[in-house]
Image (spheres, rainbow, N blue to C red):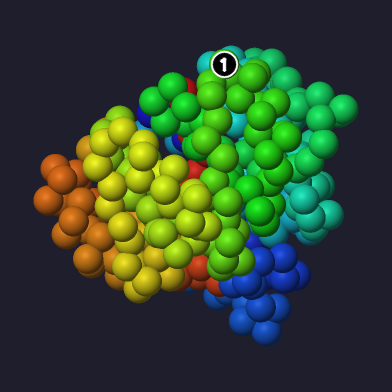
Amino acid sequence: MRILMCPPDHYNVEYEINAWMRITRTPDAALAKKQWDALYTLLSVRLGADVELISGHHGLPDMVFTANAGIVDGGRFIPSRFRHAERQGESPYYERWFVTHGYNIQPVPEYIAGTHEGEGDSLMWRDLLLCGHGHRSDVPAHCAIGGMLGRDIIALQLVDPRWYHLDTCLLPLTDDLIAYYPAAFDSESVTAIERLPGKKIKLSDHDAALFGANAVVIGKHVIMNSGCEELMSTLRDHGMKPHATDLSEFLKAGGAAKCLSLMLDH
């Protein structure tokens, strides 16, 4: 498993573009670095993931959330088209990293309307692309990405601003198991999720608020924010191996383990 991460050297809450951000509630920089280091060590040392690094940049405090950079498919990179101006400056740095590392950059064609924010709202599962829309990403862009990837899309409407990206409230675990938070979706989307093959785990309000669904999956290992005891117990019942690590300083900007990790292997 190869993962792209960005050290939190410039991480902060300097603006408010989601329901979790408050410029009056800024992260503790030293504690955020300690928490990020613990996640990095868990992924790379304990679980053996190959973690690549990209440098952050002054004025781009959310660049630490690499999952939003785009979508990787083999040797190509589909860069995000960020909705908010505060994040649009990240794109040139991400594209430069991927070019330098031998990837072919294939943006969504300019004539396609709408925004999309990488793995934040586009999750590959089986031969499908599960797509969240309503806050940060739009269906036309997802349809274009599905065509580029050769995957049918399942469009899922997000209705609660606290769960503004799909990866904050839906977690594909295996080909036959998905965890999700029903209250984040409209009723039609809940029905669509329940109709997908395999079993479903429904997150409690408590675990959803701690971003339990915003987790990294490496085989049977599930790496998530600490405090989600009910979800961890349920995962064990399904044969998974959950690992908790404190990411409280990143929740202040609306992110946890998955937001901090972009999957490079698909």
Which residue matches tag 1? 150
In this rendered view, identify the residue nearer to me: 85 or 247: 85
> Based on the displayed image, in which of its 4 quarters is residue 113 positioned?
top right
On the image, the x and y values in percent for residue 27 come to 58, 74
Q: Look at the picture and state if 1 lies above or below 86.
A: above
Residue drawn at x 48%, y 56% is: 187
The amino acid pointed to by label 1 is Gly
> Based on the displayed image, in which of its 4 quarters is residue 92 positioned?
top right
Instruction: Find numbered disc 1 in the image and state the secondary structure of the residue it sits on.
Output: loop
On the image, the x and y values in percent for residue 244 come to 29, 59
113 horizontally vs 76: left or right: right
In this rendered view, identify the residue nearer to me: 107 or 260: 107
**Residue 90: in sight, yes or no?**
no
148 horizontally vs 211: left or right: right
**Residue 189: in sight, yes or no?**
yes
Q: Quadrant of the N terminus?
A: top left
In this rendered view, identify the residue nearer to me: 61 or 17: 17
Q: Look at the picture and state if 207 lies above or below 149.
A: below
